[in-house]
Image (cartoon, rainbow, N blue to C red):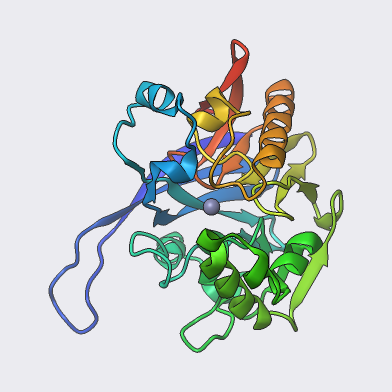
Amino acid sequence: MIFTRRTILRMGAAAGATALLPLRSFAAQTMTLGSATLDTLSDGNLVLPMGFVTDHPGAAEVMARYGITGPQVEPPCNVTLYRDGTNTVLFDVGAGPDFMPTAGKLHEALDALGVSADEITHVVFTHAHPDHLWGVLDEFDEPIFANAQHMMGKAEWDFWIDPETQNTIDEGRKTFAAGALRRMSMLEDRIVTFGDGEEILPGVGARASHGHTPGHMAFEVRQGNSACMVVGDAIGNNHLAFAEPLWASGSDQDAEMGAQTRLGLLNQLADAQMPMIGYHLPEGGIGRVERDGAAFRFATEV
Ligand SMILES: [Zn+2]
């Protein structure tokens, strides 16, 4: 396994104008698995109130250890690109233009890597929250990755495609439900659903990791003896999720199930010393789980 970290700098220029836009840097990571390649691409970042992470009374003390003391957090968003020579697979598609001004930058990152939307053969979703799904359609409501088969866990698909979910979901997530239903309705003729344990593509196994959402999936990507787990939001940050994995996270729709899922994955990844990619983890999101006493820490060197 070969692991490199690189930063791609790209100069943007307004169409038809000579004025240069500010530089945007893409912190991208690359990992090889056998003859295949995993890249992480930045979709930008979210800006969230601290209460969305946790309302645990001990949170401020833990966060301070990580240098986070303000009322909000700004988690990065890392889309994973997997290329094995046959398939070109995106895991999640970022937030698109309608969620937060700081996110929805995936296409700039793909451009910087020299990969066009038409080259994507498969789009695989961890779950259907806005920052993972809403980048799927263009301004005409057509799928941006026009040649791709789109894939989502069956439980996740069934939850968000049900119009009743908009009535039953908590108040703070009603926009999530409406946004997911609108976009997923446009994908109905091209979606393939799958279940826990299925090998959905050669070398890509689905792993049920429910709790963050009702049908959240992680993916074990394997080539021979080398493997990496794409965990999505099942391990949602590099601080509380590792230091206090059993504390309820405000971002998990079922906090208790989310905590058990998180702990199970952390134990498995630490025991196997298997690299992981976290959607909201720092520096491109590729790293490893290390034990830290009774808890864990995120090691950014694979
Ligand atoms: Zn997310």
Q: Is residue 267 visible?
A: yes
Residue at the spot 22% in from the left edge and 76% down from the top edge = 14
Coordinates of residue 290 in the picture (x, y in percent) = 60, 20
- The residue at 75%/74% (across/down) is 191
Numbered label tally: 0
Task: Name the spot of residue 46 as percent of width and height, x first.
Answer: 40, 53
Question: Seen from this angle, which residue lies furthest bottom?
Answer: 140
Q: Is residue 263 above or below residue 143?
A: above
* Horizontal arrangement in the rendering, residue 223 relative to residue 143 (left or right): right
Hey, which residue is sitting farthest top in the picture?
293
The answer to whether residue 300 is visible is: no
Residue 123 coordinates in the image, percent (x, y): 66, 66
- The N terminus appears in which quarter of the rendering? top right
Drawn side of residue 199 relative to residue 250, left or right: right
Residue at x 43% of width, y 67% of height: 99
Q: Would you identify the image quadrant in which residue 148 lies?
A: bottom right
- Give the side of residue 27 with respect to residue 152, left or right: left
Q: Which residue is drawn at the image coordinates 64% and 41% (left, top)?
A: 255
**What is the quadrant of residue 187 in the picture?**
bottom right
Quick one: quadrant of the C terminus?
top right
When the figure is inspected, residue 150 is found, relative to residue 59, above or below; the finding is below
Between 292 and 300, the one nearer to me in the picture: 292
The image position of residue 161, as x and y in percent, is 71, 74
Looking at the image, residue 193 lies above or below residue 73:
below
Q: Is residue 138 left or right of residue 2?
A: left
